[in-house]
């Protein structure tokens, strides 16, 4: 399993989203509070964001634990964006631990993170993925079909493989799509934006827990929640 987070709103630093919150991704890498499978997220971390003047999102990924990356900690306070997707990874048993297996994945427009697991045999062969891990293959599949159909894709795969866990976050810089299918997800409407995360990064009472098997669509106008077909 993994922990992930997405932000949409006014520019916010990567440190403010990932490192400084009391129970943020840095803490979740070694002490998650709501993770159902696994106890540590030490098999890598990654962040992607849309930067002013760049048509495609930029990424910083590593196969090492987030708590070990002093270089990132030194620059995160001065990197900011209106749209960010970040994750810490707990690799599924048997999956490679490598940078290419670490979210976020991208097709050059969308960023994607997967919190969960899926049998690779449930996905089509010959996908053009960044790694042979299940999450990278799932990302390639979503990109091939189209992230706008995320709810349909997750419902179809969930019915094909009942044991799959398919919490997915995707963003194109102007909106966030997210699914709950087998694990936790929450969101917080803040004064200058909206954050969607595997679990709350602090104890703010405004966090809203999302029921299982829902699709969220987040824009600057607000949030639309839709039940996924069961």
Image (cartoon, rainbow, N blue to C red):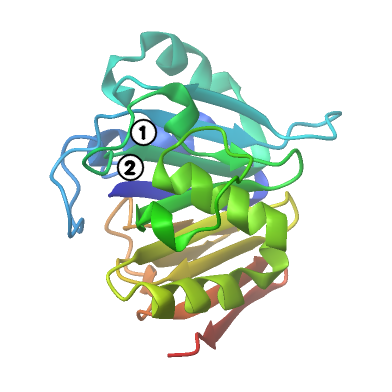
Callouts 2 and 1 close, C-beta under 8 Å: yes
User: Taking 108 as reference, is 2 above or below it?
Assistant: below
Q: Which of the two discs, 2 and 1, sits closer to the camera? A: 2
Left or right: where 61 falls relative to 97: right
- Residue drawn at 54 percent across, 23 percent down: 60
Q: Element under label 2?
A: loop
User: Who's the residue at 50% across and 22% down the image?
Assistant: 76
The x, y position of residue 58, in whole percent, is 68, 28
Along the line of sight, which residue is nearer the eye, 158 or 30?
Answer: 158
- Disc 1 secondary structure class: loop
Q: Residue at x 15, y 41 (%)?
A: 31
Question: Which residue corresponds to mark 1?
Answer: 20
Is residue 132 in view?
A: yes
* Percent position of residue 4, x then y: 41, 48
Q: Residue at x 70, y 55 (%)?
A: 144
Image position of 32 (left or right of 136): left
Percent from the top left, x then y, of residue 164?
Answer: 33, 66
Which mark is on residue 24? 2
Which residue in the rendered view is the most extreme toward the front?
125
**Quick check: 198 above or below 49?**
below
Q: In what quadrant of the picture does the C terminus appear?
A: bottom left
Please determine whether, in this image, residue 71 is positioned above or below residue 32: above
Q: CA distance from mark 2 to mark 1?
A: 7 Å
Q: Which mark is residue 10?
A: none
């Amino acid at each position: 399993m993994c922990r992930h987070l997405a932000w949409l709103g006014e520019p916010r630093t990567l440190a403010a989203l990932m490192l400084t919150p009391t129970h943020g991704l840095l803490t979740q890498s070694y002490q998650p509070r709501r993770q159902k499978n696994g106890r540590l997220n030490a098999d890598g971390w990654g962040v992607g964001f849309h930067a002013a003047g760049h048509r495609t999102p930029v990424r910083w990924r590593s196969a090492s634990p987030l708590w070990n990356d002093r270089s990132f900690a030194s620059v995160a306070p001065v990197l900011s964006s209106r749209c960010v997707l970040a994750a810490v990874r707990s690799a599924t048993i048997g999956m490679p631990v490598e940078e290419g297996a670490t979210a976020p994945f991208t097709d050059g427009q969308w960023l994607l993170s997967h919190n969960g697991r899926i049998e690779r045999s449930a996905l089509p062969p010959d996908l053009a993925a960044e790694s042979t891990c299940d999450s990278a293959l799932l990302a390639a599949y979503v990109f091939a079909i189209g992230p706008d159909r995320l709810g349909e894709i997750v419902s179809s795969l969930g019915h094909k493989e009942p044991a799959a866990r398919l919490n997915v976050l995707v963003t194109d810089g102007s909106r966030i799509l997210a699914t709950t299918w087998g694990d936790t997800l929450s969101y917080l409407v803040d004064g200058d934006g909206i954050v969607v995360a595997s679990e709350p990064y602090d104890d703010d009472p405004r966090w809203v827990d999302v029921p299982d098997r829902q699709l969220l669509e987040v824009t600057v106008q607000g949030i639309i929640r839709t039940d996924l077909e069961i």
